[in-house]
Image (cartoon, grey):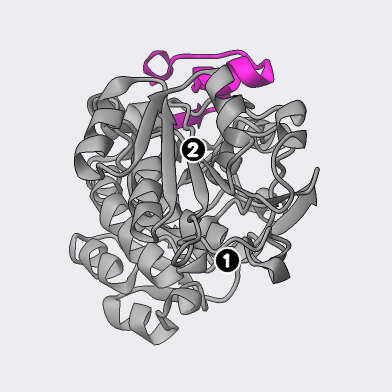
Amino acid sequence: MTIGIPKEVKTDEFRVGATPSNVSVLVSEGHELFVQSSAGVGSGFSDADYINAGAVIVNSAEDLYSKAILVVKVKEPQPSEYDYLNETHVLFCYLHLAPLKELTSILLEKKVCSIAYETVEIKNELPLLKPMSEIAGKMAPVVGAYHLSRYQGGNGVLVSGADGVKPSNVLIIGAGNAGFNAAKIANGLGAHVSVLNRSNPRLEELQKSFPDVNTAIYSTELLHKLLKDSDIVIGTVLMHGGGKTPRLISKEMLSEMKDGSVIIDIAIDQGGISQSSRPTTHTNPVFIDEGVVHYCVANMPGAYPKTATIALTNATLPYIKKLSNDGVIETIKNNEAIAHGVNTHNGHLTNKAVADEQGFEYKEINRLI
């Protein structure tokens, strides 16, 4: 297999799709690796590191895409990359297509076989989303605490409180990997933490791990009540299968929140949990709506690219090896997890949640291969 690792071009994205050690493994198994020059610099890996691992360095994205069959990225292709895509490519990266109809159309038009990290699924677990959910969850309370500062537009409440002063109220919506890790860090910071989730098992697990954390089954009424007294709200709701995140926080609810409170919308990649949410970047991470600070950075783990790249590629490497060693079609046929990950193939949309959201025709991948 010829495998290409392009340099990410999304704003403020410094992660990379493979480390030099990943390249070394793949080269040792007989594959040809092309890495775009400086692709790994933001994560601490030089071109020389990749050359020593056995990769060939190419100067341009155009050159890389012309050589590679399997293109391994971190984030979805950006408009500047669309012209490089064609029907020979297998694209393996985060896609989050539900809110990105233009990109869906491009992948269909170009007949790209695209496999989304976030929809690779094993027994209701998302192994390629899990490491980034962990990092985003651990970041969220820290980011929220920073933006509570009066100088960042916040209400001036110290997250941990002080002697004789109550700590901040942190509300976490969703108790999956991101929510669990957000609760862990917020609790460790000394905040008063509440977690809402639609089912009990994860809440019970949270309660055993962190007895100080308040847990409750989600309802619109309870969310509305808790929002009014929250200093930090962390949205971690995830729709399995790549569907768009429900907008749980209405404009009316937002207007009743405290001025200077902070929303950290981890779910922004798939649309966000608030009607007011819109994607931001690490360079310009926040905006204020109805007096509430919104942090909606769509690639939160990119703030810590070395940790994030290593955590991500530890998870993706076994799948890259399988696609490369067994062949893409055979892997899709025989590996249910990868089959779940296929979003587009040969001009057809194979993700039902995205098809329902965007109005495209849906085709089951098993009927196309």
Q: Position of residue 345 (x, y in %)?
A: 50, 28
Badge 2 local density, few (<14 within 10 Å), some, or many (20+)?
Answer: many
Front residue of 153/86: it is 153
Front residue of 89/249: it is 249
313 horizontally vs 303: left or right: left
Residue drawn at x 43%, y 82% is 47
Q: Position of residue 155 (x, y in %)?
A: 68, 58
Badge 1 local density, few (<14 within 10 Å), some, or many (20+)?
Answer: some
**Helix, strand or loop for disc 1:** helix
Number of the label disc, if any, that sits on residue 135 = none
What range is drawn magenta here?
342-369
Viewer can see residue 271: no
Q: Amino acid at mark 1?
A: Tyr
The residue mark sitting in front, 2 or 1, is 1
Q: Is residue 366 above or below residue 230?
A: above
> Which comes before the other along the chain, label 2 or label 1?
2
Front residue of 30/135: it is 135
Residue drawn at x 37%, y 26% is 340
Residue 362 lies within the magenta run? yes
Q: Position of residue 256 (x, y in %)?
A: 73, 34
Q: Where, quadrant-wise, is the C terminus in this rendering?
A: top left
Q: Amino acid at mark 2?
A: Ser
Q: Which residue is mark 2?
A: 114
Residue drawn at x 74%, y 49% is 259
Residue 55 lies within the magenta run? no
Q: Is residue 161 above or below residue 41?
A: above
Q: Is residue 140 above or below residue 266?
A: below
Q: Which residue is mark 1?
A: 146
Q: Quadrant of residue 337?
A: top left
Residue drawn at x 72%, y 32% is 275
User: What is the CA distance from the residue labelled 2 to the residue labelled 1?
Assistant: 37 Å
Q: Quadrant of residue 120?
A: top left
